[in-house]
Image (tube, grey):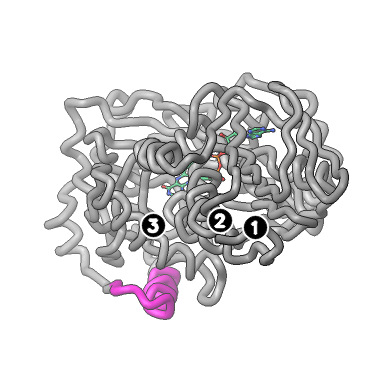
């Protein structure tokens, strides 16, 4: 059995495969020389509680269950984790009805969320400006790279092979098995799980599955507070998000290492691994340009998109946005930090696919949309994928 990708979803899935198929040969194929090299190693490090997601969606269920299993896993494995809670704050009167709707959604998702007034926000976060807020106590922080290191140790102890520097370049079928053409030779697999993140749609199509969507890369850029100004933020502070978009807006995040990040924004990236503004890939740009959904998205959101691009180009504009939450923030209080690139699936009709998308192929499962909060939900996503594999393989 082969898992493509050693991000957190691939590693969590490999662990579940080993549990269900204790005697099967299992290999994780990763094109990079290290694990967690892409989305999993470039994110906000927040264990989301599940407040935002449509009740009944995979995101809502797997995030809620996944945040609990992630915290338990970290405690068991000695990975530093902190359940610090978070505040979602309204800074304008117009945001109050949306804050209330979010509170109701959190309750519908079974979370212990509560409304807090401006005074309580000031006590918890003296530098944050708020008219009102929601307290989400089950939110936590972690370094997902360290979670992956812990998963890797467990997998290696359980005889799962991790093949780094092995890029899957082509897929074919013969005699009921998959033939994977890789940069390190041919690999045969009786079952395939595609957890290739930013490249998952291409591999799904190469395996004959139709995800009905394309991955469009959205870069998320961050600044961080200079060490002398970290006292401006004590915990996690989020704005009220635009309900039409799957991005949460520029937020303030105290990371598990004590640094404080501001961001991420969401700007279209010129390459699926375009961590810098100037990184462009003709292949990736062409793939986006020929997808009808892209132009429908642009028509719908060009105004929001232009504002995001402007904030990406201008530090002053980025800081002005963050100042809505943190009025004392000065231009010299922040310095640029490493960016991440989101693998966001975009449907043909121009809608950003909101829920996790897991597509069943022939003796194959393809994870075709696993954006935030998929790192939080990863252990449960792995369980769901493996539970969905038909009983056609050598069992225990
Ligand atoms: C800016 C940003 C902030 C985020 N914040 C949070 C957060 O706070 N909390 C949260 O829960 N989630 C967050 N997320 C989302 C989270 O990071 C992702 O949902 C999660 O990491 C997805 O994991 P993955 O394993 O699917 O993808 P990845 O980590 O991208 O892994 C995919 C792997 O597949 C490999 N691969 C690709 N193609 C091939 C190939 N052909 N052959 C072999 N290997 C291949 C890649 O090299 C990569 O290692 C954030 C994401 C971003 C970008």
Which of disc 3 and disc 1 is earlier in sequence?
Answer: 3
Closest to the camera, between mark 1 and mark 3, is: 1
SS at badge 2? loop
**Is residue 373 placed above or below 259 in the rendered structure?**
below
Residue at the far top: name it.
278
Q: Which mark is residue 394?
A: 1
Circle 2 is placed at which residue position?
A: 21
- Can residue 101 be seen at all in this image of the molecule? yes
Disc nearer the start of the sequence (3/2): 2
- In magenta stretch: residue 188: no
Residue 373 at least partly seen:
no
Which contiguous range is marked in magenta?
Answer: 97-113
Please name whichever residue, 281 or 199, is drawn nearer the observer in this view of the structure.
199
The answer to whether 172 appears left or right of 199 in the picture is: right
User: Seen in the image, is 223 located left or right of residue 389?
Assistant: left
Q: Report if residue 99 lies within the magenta region.
A: yes
Q: Dot 3 surroundings within 10 Å: few (below 14), some, or many (20 or more)?
A: many
Residue at far left of view: 123
Dividing the image into four equal quarters, which quarter contains ligand 1? top right
Mark 3 lies within 8 Å of ligand 1 (Cβ measured): yes
Q: Are there few (<14), some (14-19), or many (20+) residues within 10 Å of tag 1?
A: few
Location of residue 5 by image quarter: top right
What residue is rendered at 38% in x and 57% in y?
A: 48
Position above or below: 255 against 276: below
Please indicate whether residue 344 sits to the left or right of residue 55 in the image: right
C-alpha gap between disc 2 and disc 1: 7 Å
């Amino acid at each position: 059995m082969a898992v493509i990708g050693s991000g957190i979803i691939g590693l969590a899935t490999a662990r579940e495969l080993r549990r269900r198929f204790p005697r099967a040969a299992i290999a994780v194929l990763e094109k990079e020389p290290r694990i967690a090299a892409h989305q999993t190693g470039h994110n906000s490090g927040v264990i989301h509680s599940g407040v935002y997601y449509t009740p009944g969606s995979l995101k809502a269920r797997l995030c809620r269950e996944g945040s609990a299993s992630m915290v338990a896993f970290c405690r068991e494995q000695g990975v530093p984790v902190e359940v610090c809670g978070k505040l979602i704050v309204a800074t304008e009167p117009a945001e109050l009805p949306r804050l209330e709707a979010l509170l109701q959604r959190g309750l519908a998702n079974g979370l212990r969320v509560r409304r807090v007034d401006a005074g309580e926000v000031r006590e918890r976060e003296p530098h944050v400006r708020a008219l009102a807020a929601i307290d989400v106590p089950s939110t936590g922080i972690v370094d997902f790279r360290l979670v992956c290191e812990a998963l890797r140790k467990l997998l290696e102890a359980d005889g799962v092979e991790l093949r780094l520097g092995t890029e899957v370049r082509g897929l074919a079928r013969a005699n009921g098995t998959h033939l994977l053409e890789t940069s390190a030779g041919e690999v045969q697999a009786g079952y395939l799980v595609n957890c290739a993140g930013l490249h998952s749609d291409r591999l799904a199509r190469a395996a004959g599955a139709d995800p009905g969507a394309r991955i469009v890369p959205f870069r998320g850029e961050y600044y961080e507070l200079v060490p002398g100004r970290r006292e401006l933020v004590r915990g996690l502070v989020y704005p009220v998000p635009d309900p039409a978009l799957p991005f949460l807006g520029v937020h303030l995040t105290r990371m598990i290492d004590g640094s404080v990040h501001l961001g991420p924004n969401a700007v279209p990236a010129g390459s699926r691994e375009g961590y810098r503004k100037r990184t462009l890939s003709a292949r990736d740009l062409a793939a986006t340009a020929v997808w009808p959904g892209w132009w429908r998205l642009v028509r719908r959101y060009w105004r929001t998109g232009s504002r995001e691009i402007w904030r990406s180009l201008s530090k002053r504009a980025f800081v002005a946005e963050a100042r809505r939450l943190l009025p004392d923030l000065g231009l010299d209080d922040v310095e640029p930090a490493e960016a991440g690139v989101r693998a966001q699936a975009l449907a043909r009709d121009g809608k950003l696919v909101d829920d996790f998308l897991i597509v069943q192929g022939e003796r194959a499962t393809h994870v075709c949309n696993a954006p935030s909060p998929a790192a939080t939900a990863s252990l449960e996503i792995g369980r769901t994928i493996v539970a969905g594999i038909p009983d056609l393989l050598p069992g225990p």
